[in-house]
Image (cartoon, rainbow, N blue to C red):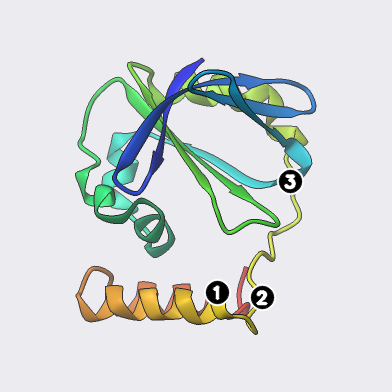
Amino acid sequence: MKAEKIHGDAENSIVIALTDSGFEIAEGWGSKIFYPWADVSELSVEGPDAIQKRITASRLLLTGVFAFAFKKKTGEAFAFIDFKNSNDPIVLRFPKKSEPEIKAFFAPFKSKISSTPSNKLDNSGPDTIEQLEKLSDLFERKLIDEAEFKASKAKILGLTD
């Protein structure tokens, strides 16, 4: 299925293929990356209405300023894929596809995703400090509220799931 991979302000056209063992993303000329379902900690599909209501700090950090540019368009959906051992979640946009269509696309494989919560943050390394600095900057610029700041900080520090 055709989609767009979003990273910061950039969008790349991709083709995503699902199998029993994982999914493959093909970008450009022959560049393919395979992701096993066992490495996926969470997969959520949302429509444009949910995107407008739920721009979380982590998604804001991932998508940058583009998070505010998610426009309410009918007939498109977004998939957010988080991994257990990686700090790089994947955001996919499916133009001309509805939220129910994309949920149905992933539905046969949802049971293959590990229900074990991801513990991808090690609160002793430089990544944690970097994440906390970015989070603090978002809060200071009033891009997130105090409740979201506290919840995200606790997650970064490994105090919550």
Q: Is residue 127 left or right of residue 150?
A: right
Q: Earlier in the sequence, mark 3 or mark 2?
A: 3
Q: Position of residue 108 (x, y in %)?
A: 69, 22
Q: Is residue 114 left or right of residue 59?
A: right
Vertical side of 12 occupied by 88: above or below = below
Q: Position of residue 135 (x, y in %)?
A: 38, 75
Nearer to me, 32 or 78: 32
Q: How busy is the neighbourhood of tag 1: few (under 14 within 10 Å), some, or many (20 plus)? A: some
For this orientation, the residue located farthest to the front is: 29
The kind of residue on which mark 3 rests is Asp
Mark 3 = which residue? 39
Please name the residue shown 67% across and 28% down the image.
23
Q: CA distance from mark 1 to mark 3?
A: 20 Å
Check disc 1 and report its element: helix, strand or loop: helix
Mark 2 = which residue? 122
- Residue 34: name its quadrant: top right
Q: Which mark is residue 127?
A: 1
Q: In this rendering, which labeled residue sits more in front, label 1 or label 3?
A: 1
Q: Earlier in the sequence, mark 1 or mark 2?
A: 2
Check disc 3 and report its element: helix, strand or loop: helix
Vertical side of 142 occupied by 118: above or below = above
